[in-house]
Amino acid sequence: MSGCLFCGIVRGDIKGDIVYQDETIVAFRDISPKAPVHILIVPRKHIETLADVGEEDKGLVGEICYVASQVAKEQKISQGGFRLVVNNGTGAGQSVYHLHFHLLGGRPFTWPPG
Ligand code: DGP
């Protein structure tokens, strides 16, 4: 989608520190990391929010979760504990309207989140 930051990274028009990609998913480092490892996992398909995921995207969301677990192992944050977060909508802090999963690790996390 033109004008979408993450579509630009997915297409390669905007530079991203990509750690994983396949035909449907791209994972790249967050520009403003909130943990020693902070990676954004996004579908190549432009979907604005998790709430916009359609029935046809159910498999895609499962793939993203699988990729997250694999990337967590590659980044060596799996054993120490990691967090996979989706901010859905402005009330939850979403600032980029292209669905993305935050993969965070490398430090302890508290609960509940802020
Ligand atoms: P959220 O607030 O949940 O919508 O998360 C958006 C994230 O995107 C936020 O953690 C910062 C990150 N971000 C914003 N602009 C860029 C960028 O140009 N490149 C990268 N790699 N990350 C970005």
Image: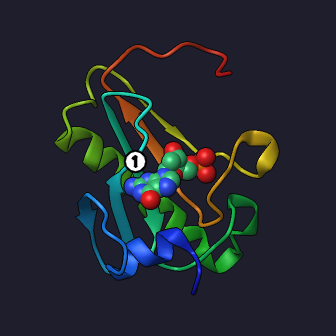
Q: Identify the coloring.
A: rainbow
50 w.r.t. 53: above or below: above
Q: Look at mark 1 in the image and give the residue it sits on.
A: 30
Q: Looking at the image, is 24 positioned above or below residue 42?
A: below
Q: Residue at x 69, y 62 (%)?
A: 49
Residue 54 picture quarter: bottom right
Position of residue 65 relative to residue 77, above or below, is below
Res. 72 visible in picture: yes
User: At which x and y percent is residue 86?
Assistant: 60, 46
In the image, residue 30 lies at what x, y percent? 40, 47
Please give left or right for residue 38 compared with residue 20 in the image: right
On-image quarter of the C terminus? top right
Asked if disc 1 is less than 8 Å from ligand 1, the answer is yes
Q: How many marks?
A: 1
Lateral position of residue 105 relative to residue 18, left or right: right
x 62%, y 59%: residue:
96
Q: Quadrant of residue 55?
A: bottom right
Q: Nearer the viewer, residue 60 or 19?
A: 19
Amino acid type, residue under disc 1 in the picture = Asp
Q: Badge 1: few (under 14), some or many (20 or more) residues near its Cα, within 10 Å? A: some
Q: Is residue 75 left or right of residue 13?
A: left
Q: Residue furthest right?
A: 91
Q: Residue at x 66, y 45 (%)?
A: 87
- Is residue 107 left or right of 54 when viewed as pictured? left
Could you say whether the residue bearing mark 1 is in a helix, strand or loop?
Answer: loop
